[in-house]
Image (tube, grey):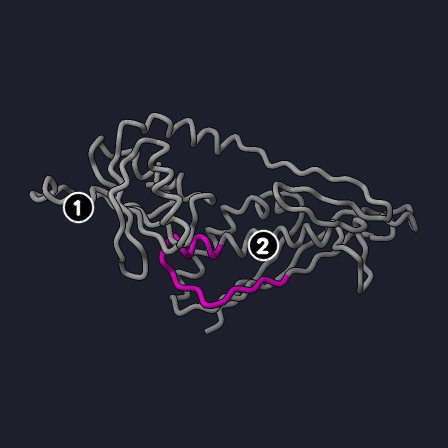
Amino acid sequence: MSSLAKVQLLLPTKNQVNNMRTPNAVCDGGDLDCGSGLLLIIKKAMDPLLDGQILEVRSRERTVAEDLPAWCRMVDHEFLGSEPGDNTTRYFILRSSAQAELEQDLQAAKGYQWSVRVRGEKDLSAKVHSRNHTFLAGQPADFSPKVNAPSALDYLLASLASCLTVGYKAQASKRNLEIDNLELSLKGGLDNVLYHLELEDEGSPKLNRITGTFYVSSPESEIELEELWNNTLARSPIYQTLKQALNIEIKLSIVF
């Protein structure tokens, strides 16, 4: 079963013909919205269902109330309505024969490429355009206490930290695990920053090591939180890319 979602297959009941709210399968999207992976989870959960069977989608994200019915109209599934659940809203979708696009959508997701556009500014900085966001980047390895814009190294560490923090939270949401607070502190240094600055001719400008601590406050068991952390590392695109090039040591600290 896919790790993207918690899917429970249910056997039909005798009253199913008279009760359009009796689901054949259930998927839990947690706090995901339709633009951040929920639709792929729904499509994957729909895959084993037959035409005319019902999928129940559980979600805590408010925007799903508007976005999910609109998506159902676009793909010719029938949106049956919603009702309050246990700390979630339960949405009901009647599967139609319009499921043929599932494999195409999954393949499109696999082949998606992120892109940015960067323009040099008048000073030693650059303006980065990423989708609907624009931000400044300073010198590649500026280590002054105050800077006009974060350096490339700041962004690299922030990229790793945010990938792990948001990834951990998203995975907890899919599993209905309660997380009170998360914080990740990272540090990284270069083999020889003076080589980067052209003050020395020996050494290397590469990052040599990243260390840090990932703090988690949660009422869940330590075993569940540790398993969630290991799975977050295993599925993090930034962590898995960087760990091939340098040593990364991040300690998990569970705070009760």
Residue that mark 2 sits on: 162
Query: Nearer the N terminus, badge 1 or badge 2?
Result: 1
Based on the displayed image, in which of its 4 quarters is residue 188 positioned? bottom right
Magenta residues span: 168-185
Toward the bottom, the furthest residue is: 256
Q: Residue at x 61, y 57 (%)?
A: 249
Residue type at numbered disc 1:
Thr
Q: Is residue 182 left or right of residue 12?
A: right
Label 1 packing within 10 angstroms: few (<14), some (14-19), many (20+): some
Q: Is residue 243 left or right of residue 171?
A: right
Query: Residue 200 in the image: x percent, y percent?
Result: 91, 49
Check the picture and name the quadrant holding the N terminus.
Answer: top left
Q: Residue at x 81, y 50 (%)?
A: 139
> Label 1 to label 2, Cα distance in Å?
39 Å
Q: Residue at x 79, y 57 (%)?
A: 148
**111 or 245: which is nearer to us?**
111
**Quick check: is 248 in the magenta stretch?**
no
User: Is 96 situated above or below 149?
Assistant: above
Label 1 SS = loop
Query: Residue 155 in the image: x percent, y percent?
Result: 69, 51
Residue type at numbered disc 2:
Ser
**67 or 45: which is nearer to us?**
67
**Quick check: is 172 in the magenta stretch?**
yes
Query: Residue 60 in the image: x percent, y percent?
Result: 37, 56
User: Is 101 situated above or below 7?
Assistant: above
Q: Is residue 44 left or right of residue 190?
A: left
Q: Residue at x 48, y 29 (%)?
A: 108
Residue that mark 1 sits on: 22
